[in-house]
């Protein structure tokens, strides 16, 4: 009975929208939101990666702003949530231009290059920082758009980290020490500063308690990237999402999914894009609808479980048309979907790639009112429900 009540509680919570909200809208671009909790950490391993199913890795998805807040839940050194770090994809270094205009507190911006080491560890190497755009305003601007000077040396296309902090915080190098070494010296409050120490990011220091809501305006040069692994999957709820696979063809084959062992289809999903379902309890339909009808073929696999230990539960492998699947879903389950262009084993051609629409729909089932499972719906069920209400 306990299990049954738990399931019921989950079903009711989902019905009331109390479970984890989907990432769609706020997290699918062009505006990116941190959400109501502190999801952006202060290190490369806890940074929030901006991404969208609408992107391919080179043509990308548009992002115009990132919004969030500092100062509430996590601890960074002695300051609560004083740093929010985002992984961004710089596509055009000479158009790179970000500001914190409109933020509610006195900000600083820091930019780091993401470096993946041979052992797979990740470092953030400092490139630039700015406190104030001018002597007349305390919002920050980092940009590389000058036609006469390189303002951010070392800025190239690729993955970077962008940090927003208050006006007292500064990044420090490794190793962590009693007296950590700041990476920047704020001898000027208005210059775009270059690092005074280019060792990798380890920690932050500072004494300001300024915090609040911020907006990072993306003026140019930054795009959202495609979630290419399970770990990276954004949460998508019921809705319609533009996608693109135009760059999948150029990508490596290490993430391809062979369908023969999963569903007995001699074909491969090339360079799949991943998302996690914000599922309802009932019947969920996923449809991958290419814009180029008749020629593009798409496949996808639905999994349950956690990344690294996924169990496939359904395949879609329709050739020459949209891929579509309807399956029974449970709001208390975790579902991952990986989709991409489908390459038959007999074909030597790469499958047609291009833009399309990803459609997620759900028909909720009626809640089971027979809570105690005795086959009768009566006052005993109501009493059980009320006893669990709000608990
Ligand atoms: Ca935060
Ligand atoms: Ca944070
Ligand atoms: Ca400032």
Image: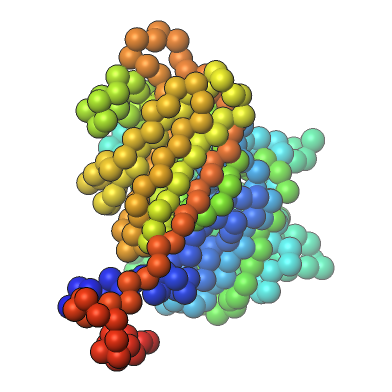
Q: Where is residue 179 in the image (x, y as percent from the top left)?
A: 39, 67
Residue at the image position 30 percent from the left and 19 percent from the top:
266
Query: Hey, which residue is sitting farthest front in the picture?
Result: 376
Q: In which quarter of the image is the C terminus?
A: bottom left
Instruction: Check the image and report above or below for 390 versus 129.
Output: below
Residue at the image position 28 percent from the left and 37 percent from the top:
119
Residue at the image position 26 percent from the left and 51 percent from the top:
305
Q: Where is residue 56 in the image (x, y as percent from the top left)?
A: 55, 33
Residue at the image position 25 percent from the left and 80 percent from the top:
376
Q: Quadrant of the N terminus?
A: bottom left
Instruction: Check the image and report above or below for 140 versus 233.
Output: below
Q: Position of residue 139 (x, y in %)?
A: 71, 65
Q: Which of the 4 quarters of the picture holds residue 310?
A: top left
Instruction: Check the image and report above or below for 351 versus 246.
Output: above
Instruction: Check the image and report above or below for 190 versus 59.
Output: below
Asked if residue 192 shows in the view, the reply is no
Q: Number of callouts in the render?
A: 0
Asked if residue 177 shows in the view, the reply is yes
Q: Image check: 359 left or right of 332?
A: right
Which sits in the foreground, 226 or 154? 226
Which sits in the foreground, 76 or 379? 379
Q: Is the image coloured rainbow, by chain, by secondary structure, or in one colour?
A: rainbow
Q: Where is residue 243 in the image (x, y as percent from the top left)?
A: 57, 37
Which sits in the foreground, 250 or 45? 250
């Amino acid at each position: 009975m306990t299990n049954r009540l738990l399931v019921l509680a989950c079903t009711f919570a989902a019905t009331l929208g109390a479970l984890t909200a989907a990432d769609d809208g706020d997290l699918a671009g062009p505006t990116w939101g941190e959400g109501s909790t502190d999801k952006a950490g202060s290190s490369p391993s806890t940074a929030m990666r901006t991404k969208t199913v609408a992107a391919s890795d080179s043509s990308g998805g548009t992002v115009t702003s990132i919004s969030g807040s500092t100062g509430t839940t996590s601890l960074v050194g002695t300051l609560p949530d004083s740093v929010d770090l985002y992984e961004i994809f710089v596509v055009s270094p000479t158009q790179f231009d970000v500001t914190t205009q409109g933020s509610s507190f006195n900000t600083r911006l820091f930019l780091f290059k993401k470096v993946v080491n041979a052992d797979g560890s990740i470092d953030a190497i400092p490139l630039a920082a700015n406190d104030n755009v001018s002597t007349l305003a305390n919002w920050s601007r980092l940009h590389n758009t000058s036609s006469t000077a390189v303002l951010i040396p070392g800025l190239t296309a690729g993955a970077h980290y962008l940090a927003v902090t208050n006006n007292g915080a500064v990044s420090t190098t490794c190793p962590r020490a009693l007296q950590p070494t700041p990476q920047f010296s704020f001898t000027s409050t208005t210059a775009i500063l270059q690092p005074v120490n280019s060792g990798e990011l380890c920690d932050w220091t500072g004494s300001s308690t300024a915090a609040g809501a911020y907006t990072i305006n993306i003026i140019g040069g930054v795009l959202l990237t495609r979630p290419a692994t399970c770990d990276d999957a954004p949460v998508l709820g019921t809705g319609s999402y533009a996608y693109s696979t135009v760059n999948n063809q150029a990508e490596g084959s290490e993430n391809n999914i062979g369908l023969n062992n999963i569903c007995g289809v001699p074909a491969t999903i090339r360079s799949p894009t991943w998302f996690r379902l914000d599922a309802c309890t009932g019947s969920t339909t996923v449809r991958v609808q290419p814009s180029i009808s008749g020629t593009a073929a798409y496949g996808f696999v639905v999994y349950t479980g956690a990344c690294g230990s996924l169990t496939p539960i359904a395949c879609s492998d329709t050739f020459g048309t949209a891929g579509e699947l309807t399956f029974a879903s449970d709001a208390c389950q975790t579902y991952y979907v990986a989709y991409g262009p489908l390459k038959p084993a007999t074909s030597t051609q790469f499958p047609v790639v291009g833009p399309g629409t990803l459609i997620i729909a759900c028909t909720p089932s009626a809640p089971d009112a027979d809570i105690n499972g005795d086959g009768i719906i009566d006052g005993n069920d109501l009493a059980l429900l009320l006893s669990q209400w709000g608990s």
